[in-house]
Image (cartoon, helix red, strand yellow):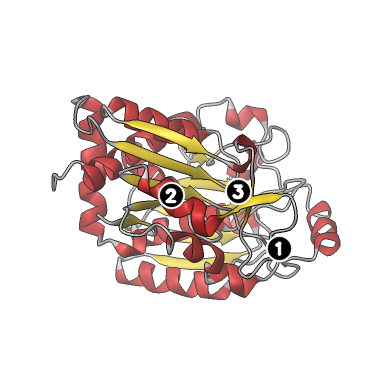
Amino acid sequence: MQSFNHLRDFEVAEISELLELAGRLDEYPEPRALEGKVLSLLFLSPSLRTLASFQAAMTRLGGGAFVISPDMSIHGLASRHGIVMDGNAAEHIREAVPVIASYGDAIGIRAFAERRDLDTDIKETAFSALTDFVGDTPWINMESAMRHPCQSLADWKTLDDFNMPKQGGKFVLSWAYHPMALPLAVPSSTLHMAAMRGMDVTVLRPDGFELPGPIMREAEAVASANGGSVRESDNRAEAMEGAHVIYAKSWSSTQHYGQRNAEDQARLERRDWCVDEGWFEPARDDCRFMHCLPVRRGVVVADEILDGPRSIVIPEARNRMLAQMAVLHRMLSGSAT
């Protein structure tokens, strides 16, 4: 495996093999599988679970990892092509990224969307520029503008762990209020994951917060090919009817993308989009709640849900480590299984 960038790069059978490997490594640890291997971690955006889970994954497999972020460096990092570096930044990513990549056997890169131009972010222009500099080093997308494949792989494992049906399973991806405009990476990747799993997916969102057309169309095609479906709704009761799981996540307004004042106003008008028990009345009695974390209590979701039996966010978060162990094992161990 030379890269782990998007679930669409793999067949469903290959995803199943990765998930089986994740389960096996949990039950039967291989503490020397990556002995002597080093993972370079470049965080151009903040992290808690992604950073900790990758470090834990490498340690559990017998390898090591080091972390680089702009906050840790005595030099600022410049990224703009053609820049005259007469300001605070003393180093450019054109030198920094290949050097960091050369120190490890693989590199993970995390760089959020700039959220200035939607088309540019959909094309992953900035992230592609970073990965162009890694040379022959295998690389992992630890979150970019529209992709978070490690989260999606962990979410797929979580759905399997809790026996969520594939074909016929009803998955609700719901927008939720947040005081800040958040990236589209998790909702876009989550939509693709559930579609690829063959579930019937409803994207529940208020007007102005539709997911980008190219993301929706790709998910619709993937769902159709795998026995599922994708639709949108702004009707909460209709969307939640018979749902097996609701995945809550805030994301930026595509209608006001890059327009901070208009975006802030659009979100403030929808502060009632906080998941509480009332949301579950039309759903199955055993409907579960998922969220990638971090989550704002009383804003995105009520305590009664997050602390109650519906929530599976803690095992979901632990699965980040296990899913990434499988990716790293496949990428670096030299073993096909």
Q: Residue beneath label 2, please?
A: 99
Question: Which residue is painted at 53% across and 47% down in the image?
Answer: 247
Q: Is 25 situated above or below 291?
A: above
Question: Which residue is painted at 32% across and 64% down in the image?
Answer: 9
Which element carries disc 3, helix, strand or loop? strand
Mark 1: which amino acid? Ser
Classed neighbour count for the residue bearing mark 2: other residues with Cα under 10 Å, few (<14), some (14–19), many (≥20): some
Q: Is 230 situated above or below 158?
A: below
Classed neighbour count for the residue bearing mark 1: other residues with Cα under 10 Å, few (<14), some (14–19), many (≥20): many
- Residue 249 in the image: x percent, y percent? 60, 48
- Residue 271 in the image: x percent, y percent? 79, 48
Question: Which residue is painted at 48% across and 75% down in the image?
Answer: 217
Q: Residue beneath label 3, please?
A: 249
Tell which tag, 2 or 1, sits nearer the viewer: 2
Decide if residue 171 is in sight here.
Answer: no
Mark 2: which amino acid? Val
Looking at the picture, tell me which residue is in the foreground, 50 or 253: 50
Residue 318 placement, left or right of 124? left
Residue 177 placement, left or right of 134? right
Tell which tag, 3 or 2, sits nearer the viewer: 2
Classed neighbour count for the residue bearing mark 3: other residues with Cα under 10 Å, few (<14), some (14–19), many (≥20): many
- Residue 17 in the image: x percent, y percent? 20, 48
Q: Residue beneath label 1, please?
A: 253
Q: CA distance from mark 3 to mark 2?
A: 35 Å
| Numbered circles on residues, count | 3
Which element carries disc 2, helix, strand or loop? helix
Name which of mark 3 and mark 2 comes first in the sequence: 2
Decide if residue 249 is in sight here.
Answer: yes
Q: Is 189 situated above or below 42?
A: below
Name which of mark 2 and mark 1 comes first in the sequence: 2
Which element carries disc 1, helix, strand or loop? loop
